Amino acid sequence: MNIIFSSLHQIDHFNETISKKEISEYSADLNRYVEKVFDEIVKSNSKRKFQFRSDTTEVRTAIQNIITGNYDSGSEVNASRLLKIEKDAQEKIAHLNIKIQKGSLFQAYLEQDEKTFILCKADHNDFLDEIDFSLRKGLPWEKRIFKAILVKFNSDDTVNEVFIYDTNNRISKYWWYDYLELEEQYTDTHNTKTALETIDRKIFTLIKKDFPADYMILRNSAVGYFRNNEEFDMNRFIETTMQSYHPVDENLQLEKIIQKTRELPDKWGFDNRFEIKKEEIKKRIVTKVPLTNSIDLVLNDHITNMRDLIDTEVDSQNNKWVKIKSDEGYKYFNR
């Protein structure tokens, strides 16, 4: 990894100032830090694809200046803009007793397989220098970055891909919408519809015939995730619905299912992370289970305690029964 340029600016909200901190361009530790940031964003299943609203927005222009050699002017523009946007955003949410996390802005222009620009906001920690025991400030080594953008360029310096990464439970809108002036490559409506349909069609439907009990439990769990969460995050989705699951049929290859699920966003065009649009769920969560030639069991929604409501039994004549706990339905069939 070849680091062409890097900079670090401390953002002082109280005094409304920015100050550039000197970092060595040739430090081996700097290379390792940039590699950690790069890998964390690229390998994360919590990043999301965006695109610039235009090539003339302030941050986009500043980034272009940096990759064409105007390092100081471009990085200063980005730092100054962040101070202004965070000040405005803080005023808007002050009544909620919420404070925007303070920190520093780290920027790096590097070349690996392609030109890449990283801009991230990280906590700027105090530490005691082990050599002269003076109090210094620096970027956190172990703690993950707070929020970031990674821009990959084509050979003609046009933008190839833009990824946003945020360690918050939800991606901060002021960061991508106000500060970076981006727009989603895929809308939340598209993501919700496509993710739910694709997971159902490409994962659950394929195990329905051979592993019907596991199909029913896993699908119900997935519907519950979409119903009970405001944001979809692929890592948390898999953790919640699959990783802790113990299959009914021991032949179910759960690890293969998990791996195939992780591959769906890139293959079928939706983000690993997005806000769930509830209106897109209801018409896609109904499933029908054939009981006899004349009777279907229709599940309209997520069932919270499926094992407590629906059970099976085999009687002494080897007849197989599906038992459903239902005060409402009982009166229709009680003899």
Image: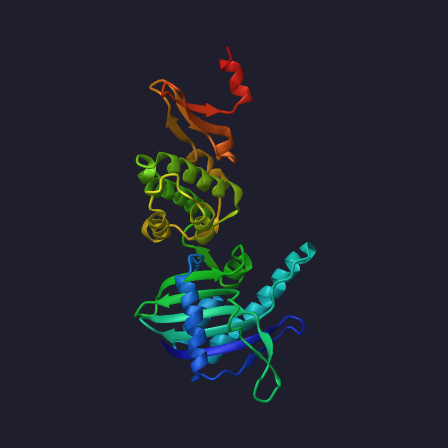
Residue reaching furthest to the front = 316
Q: How many marks?
A: 0
Front residue of 267 and 215: 215
Can the viewer see residue 55 in this picture?
Answer: no
Q: Residue at x 45, y 75 (%)?
A: 33
Q: Residue at x 41, y 45 (%)?
A: 190
Q: Position of residue 10 (x, y in %)?
A: 58, 75
Occupied quadrant, residue 112: bottom left
Q: Is residue 156 above or below residue 50?
A: below
Residue 33 left/right relative to 200: right
Residue 90 left/right relative to 228: right
Q: Quadrant of the N terminus?
A: bottom left
Question: According to the image, what is the colour scheme of the structure?
Answer: rainbow
Q: Position of residue 225 (x, y in %)?
A: 48, 43
Front residue of 161 and 246: 246
Front residue of 313 and 268: 313
Residue reaching furthest to the top = 335
Q: Is residue 283 above or below residue 155?
A: above
Q: Is residue 291 above or below residue 241?
A: above
Q: Position of residue 109 (x, y in %)?
A: 41, 75
Can the viewer see residue 195 in this picture?
Answer: yes
Q: Position of residue 87 (x, y in %)?
A: 62, 65
Front residue of 263 and 75: 263
Occupied quadrant, residue 164: bottom left
Q: Residue at x 53, y 42 (%)?
A: 228
